[in-house]
Each structure stands twice: as structure tokens, then as C-alpha cells.
Amino acid sequence: MVSRSYSNLLDLAGESSPSFGRIARRIPRVMTVAGIISDLEDDDGSTTSEPSSSHPRDRTIIVANQLPICAQRKADNKGWTFSWDEDSLLLQLKDRLADDDVDVVYVGCLRQEIHPNDQDEVSQILLETFRCVPAFIPPDLFGRFYHGFCKQQLWPLFHYMLPLSPDLGGRFDRLLWQAYVSVNKIFADKILEVINPEDDFVWVHDYHLMVLPTFLRKRFNRVKLGFFLHSPFPSSEIYKTLPVREELLRALLNSDLIGFHTFDYARHFLSCCSRMLGLTYESKRGYIGLEYYGRTVSIKILPVGIHMGQLQSVLSLPETEAKVAELIKQFGDQDRIMLLGVDDMDIFKGITLKLLAMEQLLVQHPEWREKVVLVQIANPARGRGRDVKEVQAETYSTVKRINETFGKPGYEPVVLIDRPLQFYERVAYYVVADCCLVTAVRDGMNLIPYEYIISRQGNEKLDMVLGLSPSTPKKSMLVVSEFIGCSPSLSGAIRVNPWNIDAVADAMDYALEMPEPEKQLRHEKHYRYVSTHDVGYWAHSFLQDLERTCKDHVRRRCWGIGFGLGFRVVALDPNFRKLSMEHIVSAYKRTKIRAILLDYDGTLMPQASIDKSPCSKSIEILNSLCRDKNNVVFLVSARSRNTLSEWFSSCEKLGIAAEHGYFLRLKRDAEWETCVPVADCSWKQIAEPVMKLYTETTDGSTIEDRETSLVWSYEDSDPDFGSCQAKELLDHLESVLANEPVSVKSGQHLVEVKPQGVSKGLVAERLLSTMQERHMLPDFVLCIGDDRSDEDMFEVISSAVSGPSLAPIAEVFACTVGRKPSKAKYYLDDTVEIVRLMQGLASVSEQAAGNSLHIS
């Protein structure tokens, strides 16, 4: 059975395999094909395996494009040597999880291509020793997936680069998209080999695997699944240009928890869901949630941190101390002030803009010439293509021009390091630099500022190398772009628009001129945040929220709907189920006194319809139901009595409740009654000017003045702006109408002011009490509606079941339109199904009438 296959695979490891919890605390350095592991000693020097626990530990399957593994061919070219990649975020995050007693399994690709003949052996070794499950992707498929769809289409678009020409980002290619989907499917198959879906948590990372949640959710409806996006998420105006925009959104929504580094990225995602899928979201007790087919998809906003332990251990290395001493001699002995930039050589890191700002600084402030040096470390680009070559060429030419213009013997204002550096070398530059410049034009998180802050904090040995006393307060300065993920968390940094060269040059000058005490205060504030919000804190917080989000999975009934990447899971309370046509028709046939209450908009008539008047088919169905002497049929609507009277003038026996039940009549020729005392509508003089103000400022909004209520509708407005304005209007009206006998309610694309005490629940109560007075105790009640106002009716008829107004064995059907949280116990999907149901009941009545005529 697939759900238990994980333990079968682990049996391959044998009883003597080291416990992964212990490995998590002390990372193995080298592992050979023969399965020999070095540096696995415990603190006491012995190599042991922890006894198996009497209870299973939490297990998290971490899935990413790359495994946190380094693989090297052995010297004799026979077999492989494996070791942990200690720079990998995926490896670093598990340290805190090991303390929480969480077992971690990794699924991903290796950087190196493994020959098919070696794949089985490599898979077994990685699983046994590192708890890693490699996904082997054929090279041509991987090229189309990674260098094609990921790097040419998704990555540029997510960084706000539109493919306006074939040279910019690359046009959408259906073959590359198919490769992307195929690779995600391969990853899903690998996860299926090891998952125990009832117990395991799955945590998927980054834009390479955005459709993976759909494949997993399709196989296991209740899978506990989190996704974290490490790149920016673009605004809806950018994102909507992607031809597969809905497929990716729906795939992400098959997760239980979706994580973003900043509120901006989350806001853009939520806006896309609102504009393209019509979904609404709300914040409940600090958690943002999207209702999606009965499931609540939670949104997590938390920037990732750095691995404090690893960075502090690198700071303590002799090599780091030696490199720091070398840099002090190179720059400090000549009284040079070092500014530092560390970036990948790609189009979004803004290296050239930074160089131009340095040039501007030297032009505007001659006093800094021969004093300030910008060291720019340019890491190799991760992508390929023409844009990378253009950035390289522009960078080299700009550096050359600046150095030729301002350089002198023994002084180069810009030092470009374009060779790969060891991590300790980079850390040494952090330690010596007076200011770090991170001016990317768009970036997901960027941990360079965090690394710089911890490095500037240093340690006692580095203080000695730097000539500082232990009591000397530490200081650091940061100039960061507004468009990178870490910017909001660094309130003491100088934030800049990297496109504004003058502003960046001014920021550099300000950082150089800033008084020492202020630099120390800013550093202290940053250090306090970065040291407490490390990668372990981030991982622990995410998985804690994932567990909270998934806690009610076991009690939900789930089933899948949709095909392909449009697949989604409906999750409902066990007591909430679809209304069966056979069930209700059977009850309808055997009952004698029936009460039927129907909403109109969104129930008998789709909300999106332009023409809201009823069609002849609906009129015919209602008349058929009304002709049955056993039925009392009521239409309960928020619309005005004049509109409803006109639309349903041919329905002689139809009862109508208008304006949420304020006005009521039992049949066409009866007088209109009121459910509550006649209302004083003088409050309209206060409310209407307020609504007009919002109508003037909200394009597409309208006001409907009914007899006893006022409705502001924004159905045709921009969904985000309309929703925002509706919340403001709601607050505004509640404030100005606080002393009036009215209630202000928000509904689907509307804000309504109506008399207090008026609700559709009153109609249900009135109908049942009237029938009771006439000694007509209903043994069948059907109530159908689609929005919040109908919930009052559902509540009344549900609570009436044990009361005197219904027959002792009454069949009660409260039914809402769509799968969503409701007081109703039944649902139907849409108005088409509602009409089909009503037509079925009407045909039963007609058949019964025909039979009685035939008998007589």
C-alpha cells in the first residue's frame, strides 16, 4: 500500500542505520558509495544509533528542486562520494526541527547527472544514510524545465520582466510548460514512494514546483501540505500576462499553507486570487485565510533567516582571521574605507546601477576620492542567456571607466571580484566593510544584509585582529533597495530606490558621514532582530502554522473535482452533504403539508446575470408548485416589493417577502403586510449623502433606494478597490447612523442599511406560525438560499424541528448554494442544480394532480 511504503523503503537501511535525529545535530561530512560515514561521532566520541522511540516522531518531507547534497565522482571514476551541502537553506532549517523531535526526509534533484546504471545504488545510499530521495530527471527534460520554463519564463516574470520582445524574458512556450508539468509529476511520484499521508507533513519550496501540490492533493485529498515561495510574487497586472496563470494559482491553492517573505508578495497573490478566481480572503485572529471549496488555505508572512551557528563557526575559523588581517593590511593601512557589494551577476541585482551611484558619489563629493573603495563581489549567474552576457559586459566597462577616471597609482575606487569565493573569504569582507550596499532592483529575500550584520558583530578573536577592545560597541551600516524581501525587517537601514542614482549616491554619503553612536544603535537593533529570527525560528514557525492549519483534516469529508491542473478538493463538515434528488423527491411524495422558502438572486437567478428578471421557465416551475394544494411557496428576496410584484405578476398563489421580509403578502391578491412596525426612514437623509460620496469615488458602483432600505452595490467595480471602499463605507455608515434604528450589513458585493430587527428569519417564523394557526403543521420544509441573509432562515427552520410549529416527523431541508460554511445541512452546486431540483418537484406535483383528476 502506497501510504505505508515509506517504512518499506527504510527497511533497506537495516537496523544499524544512524538515527536521522542524531544526524541532524551533527552533520556528516563525507559519505562513500560503500556506505562509510565519517564525523558522525557523538559528543562522547562513540558512534551509536538512537534506539527506536516507542511512539512515532513527526515526519516532514521537504521537497525542493535541489537536494542539500554535494556529489563527487571518486578518483577512480567508480562510484560517488556524497556530503551535506552546509550552505543549503534546506539543510540549515532542520537543526531546530531536530530539537522539536521532527524527522526530516528530503526529495529533490542532485546537481550532477547520474548515469541510469548507477541510479538505483545512489538512491539506496542517499535514502539509507542521508534520508534523501533523489529525483532523476533526463538531461534534455531538465534543461527545458529549469533553464527553459523556470529561468526564461517564471523567474523573469516574477521579477517584473514582461516578455515584450523575444529578447526580454522569452515568450511563452507550451513545450517548456509541458516539461515543467512533467518534472513536477516526477517529483510527485517520488514523494508517493515515501509518504505516509495520514501522519507526514510535506513542505514544498519555491517556484520550480508550483504545480506539485495539485498532483499530491489529487492522490491524497487530506495530505498535510505547505508551500513556501522564495521569490517575489508580482502584482496582478504583471502576473495576469502569464498564459497558465489560473493553473498555477489553483495548484498553489491545493496547499494548506502558503508562505511568503513579505506582506507585499502575499498581497499580490491574494489580489490575483481575487481578480482571476473571484476568491475572497479575511483575517481571523491574526491569520489570513482564503476559503477555497470548503478548505481554508492559510497565508503565512515570515522572512527567512540565516543559520547563526554556521556563520559563527565560520567567523571562528583561522582562515577567516587570516583573511581579515590581510584585508586590514590592504585597506586599513592606507586609511581606505571599504564599501561592499555582494551580488549574483544577473540583471535583477542592480550591480551596474550601484557602480553608477559610486561614480556619482565621487563626482559630487571629491573629498571621498582616494578614501573610499567599493569592493563588488560578483557571484556567477545561476541562469544562462544573452541578458547575463550583457550584464557582464556592462559591468566590466563601467568598472573600467570609473577606475580610469578616478583611479591613481595605488588607488582603485572599484575592486571587482568576479571569481567564486569561499564562504570564509566573503565573511572576511563583511567583517572589514564599513557599509554594505544591497541595491537589487527586485529580489525575493536576499540574506546578504543579515550575514553582514552577524559578521560585524564578530567575536573576541576578530576584535583582536581588528584592534578593538571587548567593550567597544559594534557598528554597521546598510544601504538596501526597497525592492528586496529583507528590506521591511531592517528598519535601521537606509532604504533607497536603486533606479535613482542620485539618491543612492546620497545614501552612500550619508552612511559614511553618520555619527558613530547612531551607527552603533542601528547595528544593535538589527543584530537583535537577525539573531532571534534565524532560519530555525522561520522553519519552526512555518511548520507550527502548518500543523495548526491541518488539525481538522481528519474530521472533514473530502473528495476531488475537476480535471488536470484544474483539480481541487472539496472539504466539508461530515454533517454537510449534497442534497440528493432521489432523497428529497421521495420525501416530497410521501408528505402532505409542505412549506417551501426560496431566495431569488443567486438561487433561482445566477448572480452574474445581466438581466435579473425571471425567465418563463422559472415562472412555470413556481406556478406548478403553487398549484399543488399541499404546498405553501414563498419567495424571500432583498428586492423591492414593486420589482417583485411586476416580475411575478403571473404567479397568483406565490407568497412574496420583499426587502428581506419587511413587506409580506401570502398571495398575489392579498394586501402587503409588514413584519415589524412601520419604519421611520428619516435616516436615509443621513445615509444617502455618504453613499453618494463613495459612489462618486468608486467607478462602477451604484445606489438602490428601496422603500425601507438603501443598498450600495459594487458588483461592476474593480474587486479589490470595491471591497476596500465597502469596508470604509461600512465603518462610515455605522458611525453616522449609530443612534438610528437601523442595521448596516455587508453582503455579496454590497453594503445595505435596513431597519433593525428585519431579517429573512422573520419570514420563516411568520410563515410557520401562520400555518400553525391554521392547523397546517408542515411535515416537509424546504429552504434554499445563497448568502449571509439566508442563514437566518436556515437557523429558524433548523431550530423549529423540535418545536410545535412542525409535524413530529417533519422532513426539513435547509440548502445553500455552493460548498461553503453554512448553517444549512445540505448544498447544491449552482442555480442550474436548484432549478433542476425545483423542476423535479414541480413534475411530481403535476403528476399527482393528473392522477387525482384521472381518479375523479
Image (cartoon, grey):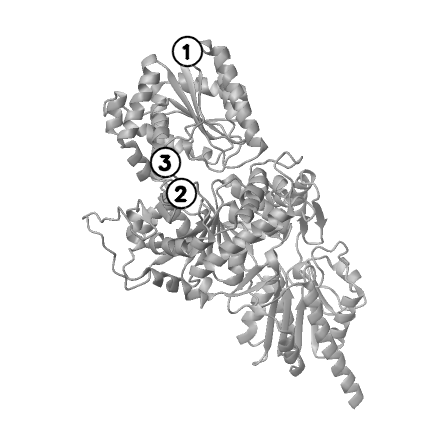
Q: Distance between the residues labelled 1 and 2?
A: 39 Å
Q: Where is residue 426 drawn, in percent x and y?
A: 37, 29
Q: Is residue 68 above or below residue 650?
A: above
- Callout 1 environment at 10 Å: few (<14), some (14 to 19), or many (20+)? some
Residue wearing tag 2: 89
User: Residue shown at 74%/83% (left/top)?
Assistant: 848
Q: Hey, which quadrant is residue 111 in on the image?
A: top left
Q: What residue type is labelled 1?
A: Glu
Task: Work out whether mark 2 precedes mark 3 in sequence or the reverse, and give the earlier one.
Answer: 2
Q: Where is residue 204 drawn, in percent x and y?
A: 47, 50
Task: Work out whether mark 3 precedes mark 1 in sequence or the reverse, and give the earlier one.
Answer: 1
Nearest the eye: 611 or 331: 331
Nearest the eye: 389 or 363: 389
**Mark carried by residue 370:** 1
- Callout 3 environment at 10 Å: few (<14), some (14 to 19), or many (20+)? some
CB-based contact (under 8 Å), mark 2 and mark 3: no
Nearest the eye: 830 or 502: 502
- Callout 2 environment at 10 Å: few (<14), some (14 to 19), or many (20+)? some
Q: Hey, which quadrant is residue 533 in on the image?
A: top left
**Mark carried by residue 529:** 3
Kindly report which numbered mark, 2 or 3, lies closer to the viewer in this rendering.
2
SS of the residue under disc 2: helix
Q: How far apart are marks 2 and 3 (CA)?
A: 19 Å
Q: Is residue 148 above or below residue 781?
A: above
Q: In this view, does 682 lie above or below 787?
A: above
The residue positioned farthest toward the front in the image shown: 76
User: Residue shown at 53%/52% (left/top)?
Assistant: 184
